[in-house]
Image (spheres, rainbow, N blue to C red):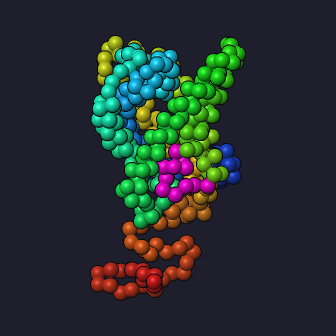
């Protein structure tokens, strides 16, 4: 047997094995669907728009806190610290430049809020487009401009509510005061729960058709663990790498680090959605050999075709009999449109 033949047998054996073992086949199916949905491009766009919307939103947060909580500087500081702790790449740098209690006028707040919303809603638009793609929502069934903007506002409100919840639960953990490893474990568990709740809310609000709660729950669990781990690893990464690189590259190291961090956040949300969509659509197990597709491969391909259709009734249902061909000049094969 030739080397190519032996290699093909190895691939075939590995393909059969991964399809038979869910713990292997399911993650591979999630990665295949992530590739089919152009997840890397969406994550990059989310990080790009998120970068330009982050600082205006932080400015609005600090200014609003300075006005609303004028008599409670401690609560202002807790809220700001909780918000910036989610961004270890810039958290320390921004926190060092923040002066609390903050002061400002409502005119400044209104102008800054409009700027922040303009930038923030651009990021939420990309998030909606990404999750609509992940969950296979047809282009013709997606919501109008004003509904998208309303959903974007709800998304920003969800983030704000998550900050408040994180601060409240963090205060409870500090009050319990187990000490040592116990406090660290409890803090990580609380972070996972808060992040899982945030991911669940995003999966329910951002797509234009809400997935089932079973799918949302599975995606939220994965997202909560990934996000909490990312926050933990991000803090170590900043301490070991970015802080040292800043001495050499200055502000460029912080910018690159922030863009990388936002990319990973977008990737976490997309992976959570892919887990939910793969489970909900039963898009697994997928084949490693493309010319030997499984039922899940065919279902995933049909989902992409239905999602990208631009003409009503142009996509046939799966398993329908072949339509009679229409003879058109210069066209070899055409499908007869479905009768209305």
Considering only vertical position in the picture, is 315 above or below 147?
Answer: below
Q: Position of residue 133 (x, y in %)?
A: 46, 55
Query: In this picture, which residue range is highlighted in magenta?
Result: 202-212
Q: Position of residue 155 (x, y in %)?
A: 47, 44
Query: In the depicted view, which residue is nearer to us: 238 or 14?
Result: 238
Query: In the depicted view, which residue is nearer to us: 82 or 70?
Result: 70
Residue 27 in sight here: no
> Would residue 277 be found to the left or right of residue 84 on screen?
right
Considering only vertical position in the picture, is 339 above or below 207?
Answer: below
Residue 335 in sight here: yes
Dividing the picture into quadrants, the one containing residue 175 is top right
112 falls in the magenta region: no
Q: Main secondary structure of the magenta part?
A: loop
Considering only vertical position in the picture, is 306 above or below 153?
Answer: below
How many circles with numbers are drawn on the protein? 0
Q: Position of residue 26 (x, y in %)?
A: 62, 48
> Would residue 324 be found to the left or right of residue 121 on screen?
right
Kindly identify the residue that appears in the image at 69 percent across and 48 percent down.
21
Q: Position of residue 202 (x, y in %)?
A: 52, 45
Kindly identify the residue that appears in the image at 50 percent across and 17 percent down.
74
């Amino acid at each position: 047997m030739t080397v190519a033949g032996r290699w093909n047998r190895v691939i075939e054996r590995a393909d059969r094995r991964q399809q038979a073992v869910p713990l292997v086949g399911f993650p591979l199916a999630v990665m295949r669907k992530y590739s089919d949905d152009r997840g890397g491009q969406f994550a990059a766009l989310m990080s790009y728009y998120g970068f330009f919307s982050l600082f205006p939103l932080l400015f609005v947060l600090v200014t609003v806190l300075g006005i609303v909580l004028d008599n409670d500087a401690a609560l202002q500081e807790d809220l700001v610290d909780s918000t910036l702790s989610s961004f270890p790449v810039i958290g320390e740098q921004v926190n060092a430049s923040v002066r609390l209690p903050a002061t400002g006028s409502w005119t400044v707040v209104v102008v800054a809020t409009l700027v922040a919303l303009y930038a923030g809603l651009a990021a939420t638009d990309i998030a909606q487009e990404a999750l609509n793609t992940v969950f296979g929502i047809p282009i013709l069934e997606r919501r109008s401009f004003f509904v998208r903007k309303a959903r974007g506002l709800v998304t920003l409100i969800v983030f704000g509510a998550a900050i408040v919840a994180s601060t409240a639960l963090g205060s409870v953990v500090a009050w319990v005061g187990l000490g040592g490893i116990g406090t660290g474990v409890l803090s990580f568990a609380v972070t996972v729960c808060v992040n899982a709740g945030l991911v669940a809310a995003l999966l329910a609000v951002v797509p234009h058709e809400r997935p089932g709660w079973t799918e949302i729950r599975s995606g939220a669990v994965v997202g909560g663990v990934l996000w909490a781990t990312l926050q933990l690893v991000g803090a170590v990464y900043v301490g070991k790498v970015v802080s040292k690189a800043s001495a050499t590259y200055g502000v460029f190291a912080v910018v690159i680090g922030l863009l990388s961090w936002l990319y990973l956040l977008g990737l976490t949300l997309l992976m959570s959605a892919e887990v939910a969509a793969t489970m909900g659509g039963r898009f697994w197990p997928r084949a490693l050999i493309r010319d030997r597709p499984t039922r899940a491969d065919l279902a995933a391909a049909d989902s992409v075709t239905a999602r990208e259709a631009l003409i009503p009734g142009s996509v046939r249902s799966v398993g329908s009999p072949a339509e009679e061909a229409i003879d058109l000049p210069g066209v070899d094969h055409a499908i007869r449109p479905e009768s209305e």
